[in-house]
Amino acid sequence: MDAKELFTRQYGLKDPDLLEGLCALAQVRTIPRGTVFLRAGEIQTHVYLLLSGVARGYFLDMDGGDHTDCFCFRCGTPTMPPCSFDEPSPENLVALTDCAFVVMPLQETMQLVHQYPELTELYARFLTDAMRLHNHTRHVMCNLPAKQRFEWFLEEYPGLIFDVNNRQIASFLSMTPETLSRMKSALRKSRYAGGQQA
């Protein structure tokens, strides 16, 4: 998928002048696995729209402990820190796999957001979706027992459970890596048993 396909097929944008302006700004960039493309304390200067791969947002506590805040894996997801554009990022953004992004300069992109109502609506939808997911995630982490948090992750992040480091997922789900490992082992056994029965 290229930038124009993302804007039209994924986002449903139609205004030809808007599409021309967006495509003029957009570059498809591959970011290798393990690359931190925004560090905590930096102010973002670009918009990153995920085409493929898995990215992670994480922060360090006072003791240097690594805490996962979010995973991005769906095509079209804006991979951005949870802060205002003029504030230093509170977390790091890293590519967990080789990732392809549509990358655009932030200032020029926001000028188009203010200029085109169609893009303003998309921007508002991104903000609403991000707030809804954040609130739902906090509810899950605070109110559900470990097994249900694990089941929620399987449903909300299909395919990631065997593709992402145990420690990173465990941190996100507020459980120990050992607890997560036991649950993954049980999942493998149930899937194997189901395959054998089929």
Image (tube, rainbow, N blue to C red):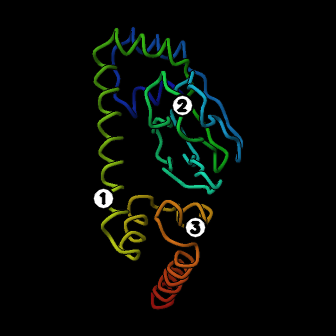
Q: In this view, which residue lies farthest toward the front? A: 62
Which disc number belongs to residue 193? none
Across and down, in percent, residue 84 comes to 43, 27
Q: Amino acid at mark 3?
A: Phe
Q: In screen coordinates, is 194 left or right of 181?
A: left
Q: CA distance from mark 1 to mark 3?
A: 24 Å
Q: Amino acid at mark 1?
A: His
Give the answer, above or below, for where 140 lies relative to 70. Answer: below
Quarter holding the C terminus is bottom left
On the image, numbered disc 3 is attached to which residue? 162
Instruction: Report the side of 168 relative to 85 (left or right).
Output: right
Between marks 1 and 3 in the image, the one whose residue lies nearer the viewer: 1
Question: Hey, what amino acid is under mark 2?
Answer: Tyr
Q: Mark 3 or 2 closer to N-term? A: 2
**Separation of marks 3 and 2 at Cα, in angstroms:** 25 Å
Asked whether 79 or 178 is in front, the reply is 178
Q: Which residue is mark 2?
A: 48
Identified at 58% across, 47% down, the residue is 53
Q: Is residue 123 above or below residue 18?
A: below
**3D distance between C-alphas at marks 2 and 1:** 27 Å
Residue bearing mark 1:
139
Disc 3, SS: helix
The reply to whether dot 1 and dot 3 touch (C-beta < 8 Å) is no
Q: Residues within 10 Å of mark 3 (few under 14, many from 20)?
A: few
